[in-house]
Amino acid sequence: MSSNNYQVIARKWRPQTFADVVGQDHVVRTLRNAIARNRIAHAYLFVGPRGTGKTSTARIFAKALNCTDGPNADFDPADPVVKAIADGSSMDVIEIDGASNNSVDQIRDLRDDVRYAPTQGKFKVYIIDEVHMLSNQAFNALLKTLEEPPEHVKFVFATTDVQKVLPTIISRCQRFDLKPIPAKLIIERLRKIAVEEGINVNDEALACIARMADGGMRDAQSIFDQMISFCGTDITEPDVLDVYGLVSADRIAALAGALASGNHQSLVAIVEECDAAGRDLVRLLTDLQVIVREALLDAIAKGGSTDKLGGVPLTTEQVTRMLDALREGEAGVKLGLSDKINFEVALLKAVEASRARAIDSLIKELTALTAECADVAPGDEKKKT
């Protein structure tokens, strides 16, 4: 294959049908039902982190609306109309970048264009990505059209920062919140891609890639693409750890165990080892917080205690204080002059916090002891003591 025909994995494996969308079943089900029952709204708002499928889902929805026998959720990907939308050559599906088309004049031009009928499909679909970048004047210019658009016009907005979208815009849309994709589904998708692309990669390496992606399928595919460029057709966990400065799951678990047991020497030794190997301490702190949070959830589920951190029994209060101390140390590790020193201090503070007692719990215990002493008979001084 020539270099001119090369496509990065994130583009080559972009979802083309509703069946390809991963981890957003609630969105897919609602859109499919809306099409089947002819309850298609005039405006939709897709909200979610980067790489979770907002724009891809919008394109698929546009395909379903404008396919030859549409609206049809089970359209044929080989349909010429569908292929034109996928190629970006359809005159009826207009994609707009909100970041670079955010002025009121550009929105006024859009407002004038919606009056014209579609050329080939049944609807003109306007997909505005990063819609939160529009100015307030642009939003206001869009309000009336958005509330009462022509019958042949549909709007689909996508944003990673819904707080910046005017409430008057949100109230005129059907909102869908796309959630971060679970690591398990990312791994399954990457494994399928690896088989199709002829790449040998073990599950540990895929787990590392999924951990780096933070719930974003596009990020995971981009990382996987980079690893293929680095390793060729054989990818192992050490390769991913070295390229991205990650710490292995075993060392993270060992660090969590040292944190729970209060082993200061082991904590410092592990941090020294990771720093000498050029590992990303900010990422290590994030991964450590994930493990401590899992232990906290385990303690809550088991009624107040857990031994998931290296087999050391800890109460819910202790794990909560530990997690809070790690969270408070984030800024120092990310922005401080020495991430290593600040990371060590954050760990040591987390150890001390987990061994501290809340004043209200001490008061409760003292109150209970006082009540017990008050119930002792006057002549039974030995028991009272």
Image: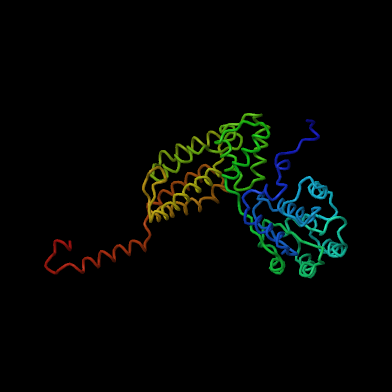
Q: Which residue is drawn at 39% across and 42% down?
A: 263
The answer to whether any part of residue 338 appears in the image is no
Image side of residue 375 versus residue 228, left or right:
left
Residue 117 or 249: which is nearer the viewer? 117
Residue 214, above or below 193: below
Say left or right for 223 vs 42.
left
Residue 304 image position (x, y, % from top left): 38, 55
Above or below, 31 against 9 in this view is below
Residue found at x 29% / y 63%: 366
Quadrant of the frame with the N terminus: top right
Q: What percent of the width, then of the height, locates residue 75?
A: 75, 51
Q: Quadrant of residue 137?
A: bottom right
Residue 302 lies left or right of residue 20; in this view the side is left
At 33% from the left and 61% from the top, the residue drawn is: 362
Counting from the top left corner in percent of width and height, residue 130 is at 72, 56
- Position of residue 250 relative to residue 136, above or below, is above
